[in-house]
Amino acid sequence: MPRKITFIGAGSLGFTRGLVRDILTFPAFADAHLCLMDIDQDRLEFAETAVKRIVAAGKYPATVTATLSRQEALDGADGVLCTILASPVSVWRHDIEIPKKYGVDTNVGDTRGPSGVFRALRTIPPMLDIARDMERLCPDAYLLNYTNPMAMLCRAILSQTKVKATGLCHSVQGTASMLAKWIGAPMEEITYLCAGINHQAFYLRFERNGKDAYPALRAAMENPAIYNEEQVRNEMFLHLGYYVTESSGHNSEYNAWFRKRPDLIEKYCTHGTGWNPGKYAYILEHYLER
C-alpha cells in the first residue's frame, strides 16, 4: 500500500521541491501519496504544480494532492515533513534589526542568539499544535522537521508530546558536492560519513575512490579562490581537521567568536565569495528583494 507523506508548509517551495526529488529516488517511496498542505493558497498551488512536474518528469507512480486543511493532510500520514515559517518577514525582520541597535550583528538569526530565541517563542506553539494533531491523527508517523531553530523546536516536541521527531537539514549533500568540485572529483567517486548535532555536522570521513580525500582538500585551500569562497568554514577545517556542513554565514553565528568584534566580522564574514559569507542581515536582504 502506498505510503502517505505529508508536507506541512509545502509553500516553502525550495525545500518542498528538493525533498520530493530526494524521496522519490527511493524505490519504497516511488508510489507514495504526496500530500501538500499550506495556509497560503497561492503558494500551495505553486507547490502542487511544481511537485506534479517532478512526478511527471520522473515517470513516478506517485500521486499528489494539496489541501489547506492540516487535519486532512495529517490524517493517516506515515511521515510528516515540516517546513513552516511561523511569521512573515515584516515580523521577523525585527529579530535582526533590533539586536543590531545594541551591538549584536546577526547574519541569519534563525537558530541561536536573541534572534533565534524570539523565533523559537513564535514557532514552538504552532509546532506543538502540529505535533498534537499528529498524536491524534497519525500517532505512528515520524516527524522530520526542517524548520528553525532546529534544536529548540525538536526539544519542545520531544519533551511535550509523544511524537517521534528528528531534525534534518539538506546541507550535507550540497557541501559534499562543493568539496568534490574543489578537488576536481566527480561525485560518483566520492563517499563520506557525516555525523553530528544538526547544524554542526562534520564529515568524519571524506574519500575519493576509497582513499582519504582530506589531504587533497587541504592542498586546495592554498588556492585563494577556494579559500575565499568559504572563509569561516575553511578556517574551521584548517584548525579542526574535519569539514562542517553549514554555510560560513551560519557557522559564524554557531561559533560566535567569528562575530564578536567588528574587525573579525570584516575579516571573516564580509568578503567571502560563496553563498552567504556572513555579512549582516544576509538572509533578510534576500527576502526583502523578493
Image (tube, helix red, strand yellow):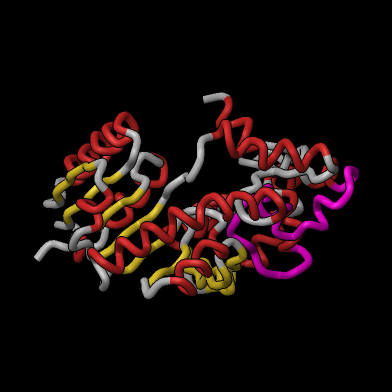
Q: At 24% across and 38% down in the image, what residue appears?
A: 48
Q: Is residue 185 visible?
A: no
Q: Is residue 221 visible?
A: yes
Which quarter of the figure has residue 221?
Answer: bottom right
Q: Which of the pair 71/42 is nearer the observer?
A: 71
**Vertical placement of residue 111 versus 51, above or below:** below
Which quarter of the figure has residue 108?
Answer: top right
Residue 110 falls within the magenta-colored stretch? no
Residue 244 falls within the magenta-colored stretch? yes
Q: Which of the pair 93/167 is nearer the observer?
A: 93
Image coordinates of residue 233 in percent, x first then y, are 70, 55
> In this rendering, would 132 be left or right of 281?
left
Image coordinates of residue 205 in percent, x first then y, are 56, 73
Q: Which of the pair 257/133 is nearer the observer?
A: 133
Q: At 36% across and 58% down in the image, what residue appears?
A: 130
First to last magenta residue range: 238-264
Q: At 17% across and 41% down in the image, what residue appears?
A: 56
